[in-house]
Amino acid sequence: MKLTNQDIEQREHAREYNFYQHDCEMVPVSLKFTQHALNELEDYFEFDNLEFSDDGWIYLTETLPEDEWVYRMILSLGDQVEVLNPQHIRGIIKERAKEICDKY
């Protein structure tokens, strides 16, 4: 890395790249987050898609790939996220969390 006086041009649509595009089924997923998850959410979602509720929760409904990426993303947020829908993904997360708990 080298310090220069050269200006950097900001890309107009830098976040348009959908890094979770896969060859799998895309499903609508509804998630509920605590305020503490806000810093991590910017890694995955546009703030325009988040709904900040008066009850202190952050809600998101977005179409996501149903694959390991989405399961791992949800699990990486630990107790700061709850899957509201679909129920089968909620069940998958519950089972994986149980398997993690059983190891300890």
Image: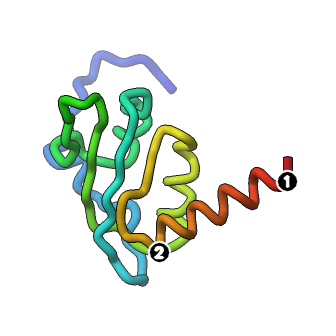
- Left or right, 102 with reference to 69: right
Asked which quadrant contains residue 50, the reply is top left
- Percent x, y for residue 6? 27, 23
Residue 99 relative to residue 80: left or right? right
Say which residue appears at 23% left-offset and 24% top-offset.
7
Look at mark 1 in the image and give the residue it sits on: 103
Q: Residue at x 85, y 53 (%)?
A: 103
Question: CA–CA distance between discs 2 and 1?
Answer: 23 Å
Residue at the location (59% across, 61% down)?
94
Asked if marks 2 and 1 touch (Cβ < 8 Å), the reply is no
In the rendered structure, find residue 88 and report the number of the disc placed on it. Answer: 2
Mark 1 residue element: helix
Name the spot of residue 89 as percent of width and height, x first.
Answer: 47, 69
Seen in the image, is 63 located left or right of residue 71? Answer: left
Q: Nearer the viewer, residue 20 or 97?
A: 97
Q: Nearer the viewer, residue 86 or 46?
A: 86
- Vertical comparison of 6 with 61: above or below: above
Indicate whether 6 appears above or below 59. Answer: above
State the image coordinates of residue 35 (x, y, percent, origin top left): 36, 28
Amino acid carrying label 2: it is His
98 in relation to 9, above or below: below
Residue shown at 28%/67% (left/top)?
63
Give the side of residue 18 with respect to residue 92, left or right. Answer: left
Q: Residues within 10 Å of mark 2 (few under 14, many from 20)?
A: few
Name the amino acid, label 1: Lys
